[in-house]
Image (cartoon, rainbow, N blue to C red):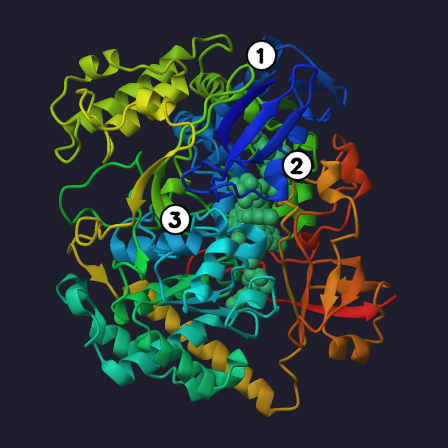
Amino acid sequence: MSTHFRTCPLCEATCGLEIEVRQEGGIRVRGDREDVFSKGFLCPKGSALGKLHDDPDRLTQPLVKIDGVHTPVDWDEAFEAVAAKLGPIMATDRQAVGIYLGNPSIHNHASAIFARALIFALGTKARFSASSVDQLPKHISAGMMFGSPTAIPVPDLDRTDYLLMLGANPVASNGSLCTAPNFEGRLKELTARGGKLIVIDPRRTETAKLATRHIFIRPGTDAALLAGIVNVIIAEVADSRLDRLQEYVEGFDRLAESTRRFTPSAVERFCGISTEDMTQLALDLLEAPTAAVYSRLGTHTAEFGGLCAWLVDAINVLTGNLDRAGGAMFPMSPNSSPRAAAGGKGFTMGRFTSRVSNFPEAIGEIPVAFLAEEILTPGKGQIRAMITMAGNPVRSSPNSQSMNKAFESLDAMVSVDIYLNETTRHADVILPPPSPLEKSHFDVAFYGFSVRNIANYSPAIFDKSGPSDEEIIARLSLIAMGMPANADPEIVYDATLNSIVQSATKNAASPSYGVDPENAIATLQATSPADRVLEAMIRSGPYGDGFKGGEGLNFERLLQAPHGIDLGPLGSRIPEILETPSAMVDMAPTALVSDLDRLDSTIRTFKRLEAGSESPSGLRLIGRRHVRSNNSWMHNIEVLVKGRPRCTLLVNPNDAQKRGLVDGALALISSRVGSLEAQVEITDDMMQGTVSLPHGWGHQESPGTTVARRYAGVASNLLTDETAIDVMTGNAVLNGIPVTVTSL
Ligand SMILES: Nc1nc2c(c(=O)[nH]1)N[C@H]1C(S)=C(S)[C@@H](COP(=O)(O)OP(=O)(O)OC[C@H]3O[C@@H](n4cnc5c(=O)[nH]c(N)nc54)[C@H](O)[C@@H]3O)O[C@H]1N2
Ligand SMILES: Nc1nc2c(c(=O)[nH]1)N[C@H]1C(S)=C(S)[C@@H](COP(=O)(O)OP(=O)(O)OC[C@H]3O[C@@H](n4cnc5c(=O)[nH]c(N)nc54)[C@H](O)[C@@H]3O)O[C@H]1N2
Ligand code: SF4
Ligand SMILES: [Mo]
């Protein structure tokens, strides 16, 4: 038997795992009690990591579709097939090849680092990712306020006295844009030390049940609530609470002016939250010694996601809580580029637009809600081929049916994925990367959103049988550059490593400043291409040894710390973190301020409908997560899916009674774009007028996942509408979908 310690790659929480590999076979996973960050915590998904590794349905050999049948082939043959399929299309029009990056691609440093090379090699504007069914509004508001789309403050969970949480359920999700293993335990500690947790959610969630107070909200209306809170705070204290931030912020007057119309009494009916409650929330935020506002998925995948993302941080600024202990703070991850001084180029959107709807790009991508039309609408630049990497857009994007039709119509498709599922079944070639236990791990993305600064590297446990993630991506990149299918991937590795080291040694704030790039590369200890780039990033990062030896972080120190290295609590980062041209925090970015008119007009429409005979309060559909499920893809692991069916429609008793719905019986749910049948579960945890169905299910058409097909469930994205987007950001509206529900 051997014991290994590693970071779980499955969600953003980065828990430390203790993995026992038995000689006779079998893998046992427990929480690593010595992990500096998670201290033994793990969830059911993490403990099923061995089952994922051993899943007989997990692909270990590439598949090529021959006469409509996915057939195992060897790797060279698979890359030949990729070149044969993509080559002719790329030769005619590079814009005709699109790429979609899914969620797990960012949970692995090899794919996170090398995906950029592939995108560059493809030279296409048809770039999509799961960001636009998720956190895109936060990138945009961070870009506009702080100058960088990744400068996202996180609540200082372990030190705050007051946490106002909207649209997040970390007891199920373990947190997002807030990396905090054992989030639940940290919330319990918050209330145990006399702090307060207030949860705003249309469902009394597992997190709401831990809270000091839970307040229901009508789905999609958080922006109005937040504007109401801003309004009260400014009326109470104007800008007197900015304290040390005073000299680093601009736009206070515009913020005050533009939110003046959103008084609590003007928005209370719209939000379903009383003026008294709204006012009290604002006063409590001001009164608490330290406080943080944190909002996540339920507020971002909404009609006013951009406004929510902005106003949350505007409140953190106004209450003087941005960038101070106990407030909302900027992490400093070990693989980030150190910054010497404030100021930069700032953030721009719309550097190009989508072909069909002319929708502006953000963070280099077109929102995925536009993907189906880009594939289905004829004309120059029509997408005829797709590469999907670690994504299941046929289940995760709005209007699954049209997305499925779009993928079905492609001339060529290549998927980098570990399962043959609803999306990859359309692929001509499927290239499976190694299992999580066959590769090293370092969370290059999530230490950037972490409530403590952490570095934790895990070596691979098992040897891999096929190529690494970076080899698959490098070989695809070479094919995209028009090279032969057997071209040497070293070209891509070298280019990536060189560019990282070149810029790091030119960065005056980096400990590696002035080192000769070649000498720097000569000191690298890591062996795999992805690890070498990672090592270079860390050694030139804020805690690095700068390739000079000495005290700082290097690869050896990471290897010597199997339980991770705690780099301490979050520190203050303003002004250095600010990349706006003015080197200030913009409290009132023009585009977001203008978007308040759209909110205002929606509130007016609501009031008009409410005053008239037409009821504005039909049923609204929201989603939910469960601790045993992971978006659309961990449903093939029996221990996680067995038991009581979880893909049920939660309905409030009053709504059920009005429609004659019976607990346990089927109901028909219909929206503008589709309808499906789901089992009803009656519960007063749901706000009246709101029903909830989890996403990611509906595996009837997933050919390669035997277990998931048995626990198929229904695909909630058959109901979500691709035309419903937050027009400010392009993010899909996945919550608050108007539906009708009838008993069957
Ligand atoms: N209605 C509704 N829809 C939603 C959401 C919602 O709340 N409600 N949530 C949205 C959110 S937040 C997200 S992030 C998206 C996620 O949407 P996607 O990123 O499109 O898809 P996932 O469901 O995460 O599926 C991951 C895919 O990666 C594959 N995979 C798993 N591990 C690996 C690996 O190590 N390497 C590779 N190459 N592939 C792997 C799986 O087989 C699967 O095909 O869904 C969104 N969709
Ligand atoms: N177990 C598990 N963990 C996961 C995932 C998973 O699928 N399963 N997915 C991972 C991913 S990719 C992500 S992005 C994160 C997401 O993590 P979270 O941001 O915590 O997302 P959810 O758990 O979906 O919680 C969203 C909450 O928003 C509420 N909500 C819906 N509409 C509204 C609204 O209009 N206003 C308000 N205030 N609330 C609303 C819902 O009721 C729900 O409780 O979770 C990650 N972790
Ligand atoms: S909470 Fe997330 S990181 Fe921790 S064990 Fe579960 S899936 Fe893995
Ligand atoms: Mo997500």
Q: Nearer the viewer, residue 580 or 239?
A: 239
* Beta carbon of the mark 2 residue lies under 8 A of ligand 1: yes
What type is the residue that disc 1 sits on?
Glu
> Sequence order check: which comes first, mark 2 or mark 1?
1
Residue pointed to by mark 3: 362
Q: In this rendering, would 275 be left or right of 348? A: right
Residue pointed to by mark 2: 423
Q: Quadrant of ligand 2?
A: bottom right
Above or below for 716 versus 293: above
Q: CA distance from mark 2 to mark 1?
A: 22 Å
What type is the residue that disc 2 sits on?
Thr
Q: Nearer the viewer, residue 19 or 208?
A: 19
Q: Nearer the viewer, residue 161 or 438?
A: 161
Name the spot of residue 231 as percent of width and height, x first: 33, 80
Name the spot of residue 174 as percent of width and height, x first: 53, 50
Q: Which mark is residue 80?
A: 1
Name the spot of residue 322 as percent of width and height, x first: 27, 62
The quadrant holding residue 306 is bottom left
